[in-house]
Image (tube, grey):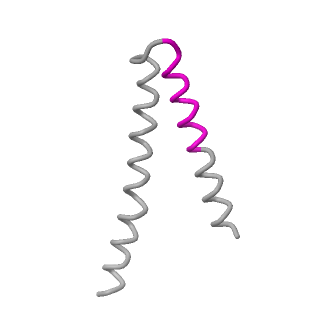
Amino acid sequence: MCTHIMATVFDCFTEWPGLRGAMAFALALQSVHDLPEGHGETIVTATTAIVVLTVSHTMFHLSH
């Protein structure tokens, strides 16, 4: 019983941040069309950098 509860809690902690990140990335991509004078491109670049750094950091720590 307790193992099932812990698995459910773990799933919630791993799925919600991914959905939040996907929404942030989608909004960043939309900002290219909505914001003037290159501000959208800056947001996409910053968002992409954060995604790459976060994923590479996570993969590094999972492999060690």
Question: Is residue 30 inside the magenta stretch?
Answer: no
Q: Position of residue 55 (x, y in %)?
A: 59, 52
Residue at the far top in the pictured view? 37
Which SS does the magenta portion mostly show?
Answer: helix
Asked if 24 appears above or below 58 in the picture, the reply is: above
Question: Is residue 48 inside the magenta stretch?
Answer: yes
Residue at the far bottom in the pictured view? 1
Q: Position of residue 48 (x, y in %)?
A: 57, 37
Left or right position of 63 against 55 = right
Instruction: Identify the residue at horizontal 58%, vertical 51% (top origin).
Output: 54
Instruction: Identify the residue at horizontal 40%, vertical 32% (top origin).
Output: 27
Instruction: Identify the residue at horizontal 43%, vertical 52% (top origin).
Output: 18
Instruction: Identify the residue at horizontal 46%, vertical 27% (top origin).
Output: 29
Left or right position of 46 against 11 = right
**Quick one: 40 or 7, which is closer to the camera?**
40
Asked if 1 appears above or below 40 in the picture, the reply is: below
How many marks the image carries: the answer is 0
Q: Give the range drawn in magenta.
A: 37-51
